[in-house]
Amino acid sequence: MPGIRKLAATMSARTPAKTGIGDSPRPGREIVLLLHGLARTSRSMKRMQQALADAGYVVHAPQYPTRESAVQQLADEHLAPLLAQCQAAKPARIHFVAHSLGNIVLRQYFASHSLENAGRIVMLAPPNQGSEVVDKLGRFSLFRRINGPAGLQLGTDGNSLPNRLPTPPVEIGVIAGTRSINWILSAMIPGVNDGKVSVERTKLAGMKDFAAVKTAHPFIMRNPKVIELTLSFLRHGSFGLPPSA
């Protein structure tokens, strides 16, 4: 299929030629799939990608059309084929690190697909309960043009997509940002926020661990502390110290 070949070429071009199993030997390889946010590209995950590759993971950072498709299409037509390609390599586990909208795409995938060797998920600034920014600006045509159909699905009411999706059946760590560089959007969001989503609305029922870091929504995936916490969770299932042997 042309679409899958194009995706494969994108993955190959953007993936460091690194293999390994992290800081302890395990059978097979462990893949980490990085999912960028709304109106972003795979380049936004470059620093995270390099850190994970240096730690021994096989890292893929695909690019997908967040402004052109609804969340359901992104999950079924883009993420599902990518994961099928990853499975062909017979990895020990497939982990995920997702930013913002990427987390809702991932939750949508798990709502309608199974992944037998799914590993852990680190969610960066996820609008798990939606964002008031969408509530207040979604009716404006400029917002619609910039954010597309997926952006309009991220409201806070009970019928919004984030509030209807189940929690994926894996270990999940959530990292929220507490700093904003956009005071206009922050004024629309109650409580501590990162300029796009409040700390409280990043939380997800059933998450295993949670951390808040002083960084803004657009830069959270590049923050050194966030990268450190991400590595800890992928390795140990915790943002804190690894469990004693």
Image (cartoon, rainbow, N blue to C red):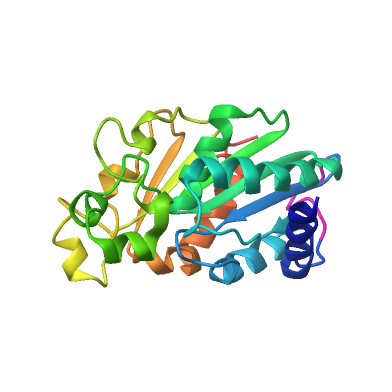
Residue at 28% over, 66% down: 142
Residue at 53% over, 29% down: 111
| Boundaries of the magenta span | 19-26
Position above or below: 36 against 203: below
Residue at 52% over, 47% down: 122
Q: Main secondary structure of the magenta part?
A: loop
Position in image of residue 136 (x %, y %): 18, 53
Give the quarter of the image for residue 92. Answer: top right
Residue 184 counted in the magenta span: no
Q: Is residue 241 visible?
A: no
Quarter of the image with the C terminus is: top right
**Relative to residue 173, is residue 139 drawn left or right?**
left
10 or 53: nearer the eye? 10
109 or 224: nearer the eye? 109
Residue at 57% over, 36% down: 109
**Relative to residue 128, is residue 171 drawn left or right?**
right
